[in-house]
Image (cartoon, rainbow, N blue to C red):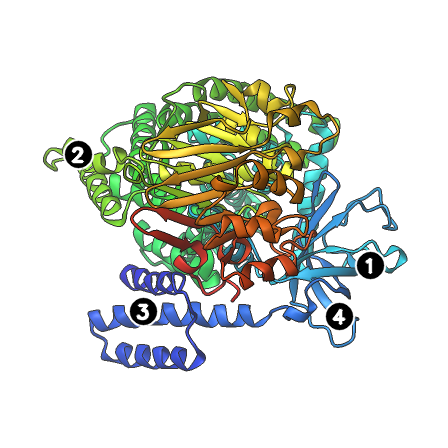
Amino acid sequence: MPCLILAFLAGICWIQTRSELLSWADILCLMAAAVLLAVLRRQAALLLAAALFGASWASVSAQMALADALPYRQEGVDIAIIGTVDSLPHAFEGGTRFNFRVERVLTPKAAVPNRIALSWYGRQEAPVASTLPEPGERWQLIVRLQRPHGNANPHGFDYEAWLLAQGIRATGYVRPAGARNVRLDTFVPRPSHVVERARSALRRHILQQLDGKPYAGVIVALVIGDQRGIEQSDWDVFNRTGISHLVSISGLHVTMVAGLGAWVMSALWRRSFFVQGAALPLRLPAQKAAAITGAVVALLYVLLAGFGVPAQRTFYMLAAVALALCSGRIVTLSQVLCLALGVVVLLDPWAVLAPGFWLSFGAVAVILYANMGRVRSERGWRRTLAMAARTQYAVTVGLVPLTMFLFSQVSLVSPLANAVAIPVISLVVTPLALLGALLPAPLAGWVLGLAHGAVALLAEGLSWLSSGPLAIWNAPAPQGWIFALALLGTGWMLAPRGWPHRWAGLAAWLPMLTQLPTAPDDGAFTVTAFDVGQGMALLVETHRHRLLYDAGPQYAPGQDAAGRILLPYLRGRGIVRLDALLVSHSDLDHAGGAQTMLKGSTVAQVYSSLPGRHPVVTGAAKHTRCEAGHGWTWDGVRFEMLGPRPDSYLDPGLKANARSCVLRVSGKGGTILLAADIEAAQEAQLLQSVPERLRADVLLVPHHGSGTSSTAAFLAAVKPAVGIFQVGHRNRYRHPKKEIYARYGELGVHRIRTDRSGAVTLGFGDTLSITEYRAQRRRYWYAP
């Protein structure tokens, strides 16, 4: 059975890497072939049949999910709908977000997917502006929707895949429609609504008791699995110390709660023998009653946790053990693990796209492998301590290759941090948090306060531990053969006793840990234009130097392009240092992520046109003002500042766009002109002052293709072969303007839009090479 389940998993994984989905005819052929192979009943044939069944099942699920689509013609138009709030709402500055299950579409001839994600900004027009929408409420709303779309960048989060896995086929916002946005029912009784309303009540209760406490979000995450209240700065500490798996409802927590429920039931069931007329142990053995109770308690806890993959895995394993115990069957832990894996991917074929899936099942598999063939001769507390140490060692070592493959870094302080955090979180904080969530005030406040105090003390120690320069090890994401070699070495190190020279397995890690970031040759350079939405951010790389031109937009307080896109990309490439950060001007779509970049990476030099008191200027190790005429050479590549003019800083009435830093980069393979948000007046100044320096093979289109830039005279001087439009999908400014986009086309310029192509990498070597991320990593869920 385990081999068949793994083959089924392989078929599902294959589908999730395809650029195009199988047609219904192809699916029927695969299923027919699988049935024929299964009839042969030979081992190899059965394995292939299981893989074909997995591919067929994933294809059918995807076809059905993609069929529930929003028509293109209905993007951005007002649609009246009736439905229910189908998730735990999340408040943010200026509004709230929630999932909405559509029951009726009131607008004639409109078609809306069954499940959508909505943002409700302001809420002043709502009948109950002082309260958030509650799960299970029925509302009539006026909404504007769009098909799923997310930023597409290497080493970045695939938002479109995540929406598909959640069953969300459109996103949008509630229109300020006054009385037409109205609550129809306070609660619609459905099982999912009952669960989500209970989660909402527990969250509200906890936040009321811990009002203003900095780690209230951690307590909420441990009780109901909602991690959105945890600050990004806290996540940085948890990730650097390798304990982020504990700040959620993990398998360990589910097992602990289920075990407690089973123990209580066992004790009560056994004593019921002495209750006259009951004789419960004679009807059902206490061991079986305890196992069933443990599985039921685990299910309830997992439902409150939001049904995440680690919690699912634990519940399915506990349910399998309970089922085997009740039926009198003998099963091994490996069989139980594979059964849980099979159920997870059967119910959710897209679970394989989540790092948590591989980390969760990988951790249990490592523990089982590392303890295979161990002779447990220890007794009492020594045995418990030895088993705990051995398990921690196995998980720490066993997950290093997978962690490097998924996140391009591994925490060096993780063993020490987990040795302290596991008992504190699992044995102190989680029980107190669960108890406090169920108790009434003021008892709840006291108990939750103790849990919060323990988290605060732990966080203080973790913060100190994570602040060291050697807290984490960074390296580029390993290639396939390097990852496979590291897995082989890990298996060697964790092999049973008696295996020769287990320490030698460490040598197989060396290629993975000692990789260096790729770099162009001397005289050549590469430019990566990121898909950051409506904003700018480009990385220029020479043989030994790197410059980031702009840092992308700020999306919301505490959320920006640097944290979501740029730092993950640099981490995935193994880049820990930037030689320069150039912030063209102060607009938030260009400077919004600059402070996060300074905090998240080492930046040797900052160039900008920002005012002297700007936080980016004061936070920089070294700052130089952008001025025309300034330039330098790195590794045979010339960098020249063409603007702004020095006297522009003397004009306080000049807007930020007019003071944009214009940078020209030239090497043996060509030239790129980075023009930020200059407008027609600045283009005219450049034509007057440095017309001979404007010629470039590639132009970063000024001001995202605004109608105030890209004059005919300027384009005639630049004569670009390629124009890069860094724009956001369906942005409110309607950039690029149709007439400007057409102007580039009339001149024969190859036009590339990041909202359609994703991140774009330009290689200036012997020839100019262009790589578009969405085309290179095409997936079937991307919109055409």
Question: What residue is drawn where x is 51% and y is 31%?
Answer: 582
Q: Earlier in the sequence, mark 2 or mark 4?
A: 4
How far separated are the C-alphas under marks 3 and 1?
Answer: 46 Å
Give how far across and how far down residue 175 sits, in percent. Answer: 79, 56
Tag in front: 1 or 2 = 2
Q: Amino acid at mark 1?
A: Asp
**Crowd around label 4: few <14 · some 14–19 · many ≥20 (10 Å):** some
**Crowd around label 1: few <14 · some 14–19 · many ≥20 (10 Å):** few
Residue with the mark numbered 2 = 507
Which quarter shows the N terminus?
bottom left
Q: Earlier in the sequence, mark 4 or mark 1?
A: 4
Find residue 185 and name its label: 1
Tag in front: 4 or 3 = 4
Tag in front: 3 or 2 = 2
Q: Amino acid at mark 2?
A: Ala
Q: Judge from the rendering whether residue 404 lies leftward or rightward of residue 539; answer left or right.
A: left
As drawn, 47 above or below 224:
below
Residue with the mark numbered 4 = 105
Give how far across and how far down residue 205 sits, in percent. Answer: 72, 36
How far separated are the C-alphas under marks 3 and 2?
Answer: 36 Å
SS state under label 2: helix
Residue with the mark numbered 3 = 50
Q: Nearer the viewer, residue 335 or 636?
A: 636
SS state under label 3: helix
How far separated are the C-alphas under marks 4 and 1?
Answer: 17 Å
Q: Nearer the viewer, residue 194 or 119?
A: 119
**Crowd around label 3: few <14 · some 14–19 · many ≥20 (10 Å):** many
Q: Amino acid at mark 4?
A: Val
SS state under label 1: strand
Q: Judge from the rendering whether residue 471 lies leftward or rightward of residue 661; answer left or right.
A: left
Callouts 4 and 3 close, C-beta under 8 Å = no
